[in-house]
């Protein structure tokens, strides 16, 4: 029996604090006029000190689970796509798993910069289609404000914080994630990167003094790459599914720059009205941008069951890819769940497990001393 991976839940989490272009004018030599005309961005959200990539991811995931009517304990797999993980390891996905109380889920991070959500969606859909798992949470989450150099006008005007999540569920009914394409060009690795803090250039006073712990980007080559690959990937995924662009109701692109989207629309010969765009209000939230835009489109009633939607992204790596999704919505007859409230219980459970580990460690120490 053929299995299909349906998108049955979606949710997003955006910090309350709004940083406008006017605010940026006070920080770097820029202007609202320059930012709007070169990028289309008017404002972005910035995480508060108590918000992290995992907390935003868990908030978005709780909302997605509620939409789908899926209890956290039913989730088999959590993938967090991010370029601003809480740590190099452990995976942010494990921290999210603990926060949600998703007791049976495996969890890992996926690093493909702004294309991460597309790759993660494809991986989770594949796992469902093979019958390996039945329910997955795919999350894109970022706190880029923590790795951006707020004195670098080339980058700080672009990025914002936020998270978005999908619930994927298996079914024998056709639909869901129909096709995906994934590409990389590592020869462009150096044009968009976080230079220090990994094993090649470990953090040191010197790396900090030279600002190598900040996101680095050469905007123009990334721009040129993006204008070429956005249309290419969208076209490729549609053809791979045996469809044509006329069959597609919505393109939900990575929200990087309105000029990039306009070029992609021209190449695809599609009007901008077919593109979901919200970068004016949230800036570039990297891998979170596609699920955030999807959640907003769903809330605005733009997405209907049966609609064919192309999600398409590009980013550091360099990477690019696209997924073709037949929109489903929550499965009929799903139960009412409250994942947000369940997180209280998850916190108690987590504290209990930590305490148990401490007690066992102390007992082991005593035994060793005694022996
Ligand atoms: O998620 C993927 C991540 N990245 C992207 O998608 C970024 C792709 N690239 C871009 O979106 C664009 O390249 C940028 C928005 C980053 C820059 O736009 P641009 O039209 O490519 O500008 P530019 O870098 O060619 O710079 C043009 C001028 C330069 O001045 P000169 O050398 O012509 O005198 C810059 O110094 O604009 C100057 N400039 C600024 N001026 C005011 C650069 N940043 C700013 C700024 N405010 N914030």
Image (spheres, rainbow, N blue to C red):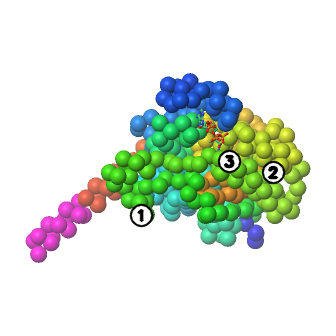
Q: Residue at x 65, y 50 (%)?
A: 222
Label 1 CB, ligand 1: below 8 Å? no
Q: Give yes or no for residue 129 being in the magenta stretch.
A: no
- Classify 10 Å Cα crowding around label 1: few (below 14), some (14-19), many (20 and above): few
Indicate the secondary structure of the residue bearing disc 1. loop
Local SS, label 2: strand
Separation of marks 3 and 2 at Cα, in angstroms: 27 Å
Name the residue rendered at 87%, 46% in the picture: 269
Q: Position of residue 75 (x, y in %)?
A: 56, 57
- In the displayed structure, 121 sits above or below 369; it is above
Task: Assign the magenta stretch its main secondary structure.
Answer: helix
Q: Circle 1 is placed at which residue position?
A: 199
Residue 197 in view of the camera: yes
Q: Would the CB of label 3 be found within 8 Å of ligand 1? A: yes
- The quarter of the rendering in which ligand 1 is drawn is top right
* Spatial CA span between label 1 and label 2: 42 Å
Q: Residue 87 appears at what percent x and percent y?
A: 42, 54
Q: Which residue is mark 2?
A: 308
Q: Is the residue 317 above or below the residue 269 in the image?
A: below
Residue 223 is labelled as 3
Above or below — where is 337 with respect to 197? above
Label 3 to label 1, Cα distance in Å? Answer: 28 Å
């Amino acid at each position: 029996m053929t299995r299909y991976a349906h998108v049955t839940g979606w949710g997003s989490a955006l910090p309350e604090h709004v940083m406008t272009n006017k605010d940026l004018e006070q920080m770097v030599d820029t202007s609202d006029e320059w930012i709007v005309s070169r990028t289309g961005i008017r404002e972005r959200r910035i995480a508060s000190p108590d918000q992290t990539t995992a907390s935003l991811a868990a908030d978005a995931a709780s909302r997605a689970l509620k939409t789908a009517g899926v209890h956290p304990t039913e989730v088999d797999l959590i993938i967090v796509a991010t370029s601003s993980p809480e740590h190099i390891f452990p995976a942010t996905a494990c921290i999210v798993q603990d926060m949600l109380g998703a007791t049976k889920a495996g969890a890992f991070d996926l690093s493909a910069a702004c294309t991460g959500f597309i790759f993660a969606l494809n991986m989770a859909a594949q796992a469902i289609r093979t019958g390996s798992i039945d329910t997955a949470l795919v999350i894109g989450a970022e706190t880029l404000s923590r790795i951006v150099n707020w004195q670098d006008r080339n980058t700080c005007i672009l990025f914002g914080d936020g998270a978005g999540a999908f619930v994927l569920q298996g079914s024998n009914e056709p639909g869901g994630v129909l096709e995906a394409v994934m590409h990389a060009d590592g020869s462009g690795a150096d044009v968009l990167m976080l230079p220090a803090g990994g094993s090649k250039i470990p953090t040191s006073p010197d790396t900090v003094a030279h600002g190598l712990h900040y996101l680095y980007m050469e905007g123009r080559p990334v721009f040129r790459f993006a204008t070429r690959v956005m249309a290419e990937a969208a076209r490729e995924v549609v053809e791979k599914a045996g469809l044509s662009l006329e069959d597609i109701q919505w393109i939900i692109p990575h929200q990087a720059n309105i000029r990039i989207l306009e070029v992609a629309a021209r190449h695809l010969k599609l009007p901008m009205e077919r593109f979901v765009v919200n970068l004016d209000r949230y800036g570039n939230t990297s891998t979170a941008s596609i699920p955030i835009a999807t959640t907003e489109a769903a809330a605005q009633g733009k997405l209907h069951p049966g609609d064919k939607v192309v999600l398409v992204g590009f980013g550091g790596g360099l990477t690019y890819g696209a997924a073709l999704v037949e929109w489903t919505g929550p499965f009929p007859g799903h139960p009412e769940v409250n994942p947000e409230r369940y997180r209280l219980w998850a916190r108690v459970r987590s504290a209990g497990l930590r305490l148990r580990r401490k007690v066992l460690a102390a007992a082991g120490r005593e035994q060793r001393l005694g022996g």
